Amino acid sequence: QVQLVESGGGLVQAGGSLRLSCAASGRTTNNYAMGWFRQAPGKEREFVATINWSGDRIIYGESVKGRFTISRDNAKNTVSLQMNSLKPEDTAVYYCAKKYGVISSAPRVYDYWGQGTQVTVSS
């Protein structure tokens, strides 16, 4: 089994920054993509960003382009999400997820999910 644990969430003022991390443990192999998603109360889960194994293919959701940066460290089995210029509409529970093979923005194709970390941006 694979376990994903997110950290780094919290409360921040609009315009501020946060850095989320996700640590993978358990049965891990090479060639897997990692993704970040978020879900606000009453809304569907939204794609944020995804990165492939080698880190040379990245996709961002439209609402976070230019503000968020995804990165990974395969030696440490971690993926990070640097969030800058945060807005109140970024408030949500943020989840990291893992899938084998190529990147995807579709949550349904991800095999493993973390428990989520709350990000709250005050105005």
Image (spheres, rainbow, N blue to C red):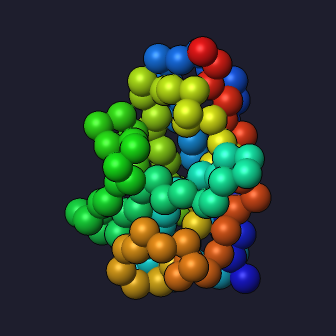
Measured as percent of width and height from the top left, residue 28 is found at 58, 78
Q: Is residue 80 left or right of residue 103?
A: right
Between 83 and 32, the residue placed more toward the observer is 83
Q: Residue at x 37, y 63 (%)?
A: 51
In the picture shown, does residue 117 fall above or below 76?
Answer: above
**Disc count in the image?**
0
Among the 4 quarters of the image, the one containing residue 44:
bottom right
In the picture shown, does residue 102 fall above or below 10?
Answer: below
Visible residue check, residue 6: no
Measured as percent of width and height from the top left, residue 74 is found at 44, 63
Q: Is residue 58 left or right of residue 122?
A: left
Outermost residue, front side: 42
Q: Is residue 86 left or right of residue 39?
A: left
Between 80 and 10, the residue placed more toward the observer is 10
Q: Quadrant of the N terminus?
A: bottom right
In the picture shown, does residue 101 fall above or below 59?
Answer: below
Q: Residue at x 40, y 74 (%)?
A: 104
In the picture shown, does residue 1 fall above or below 57?
Answer: below
Measured as percent of width and height from the top left, residue 3 is found at 71, 69
Q: Quadrant of the C terminus?
A: top right
Q: Residue at x 32, y 43 (%)?
A: 65
Visible residue check, residue 106: yes
Q: Is residue 84 left or right of residue 96?
A: left
Measured as percent of width and height from the top left, residue 85 is found at 42, 24
Among the 4 quarters of the image, the one containing residue 7:
top right
Q: Residue at x 76, y 58 (%)?
A: 115
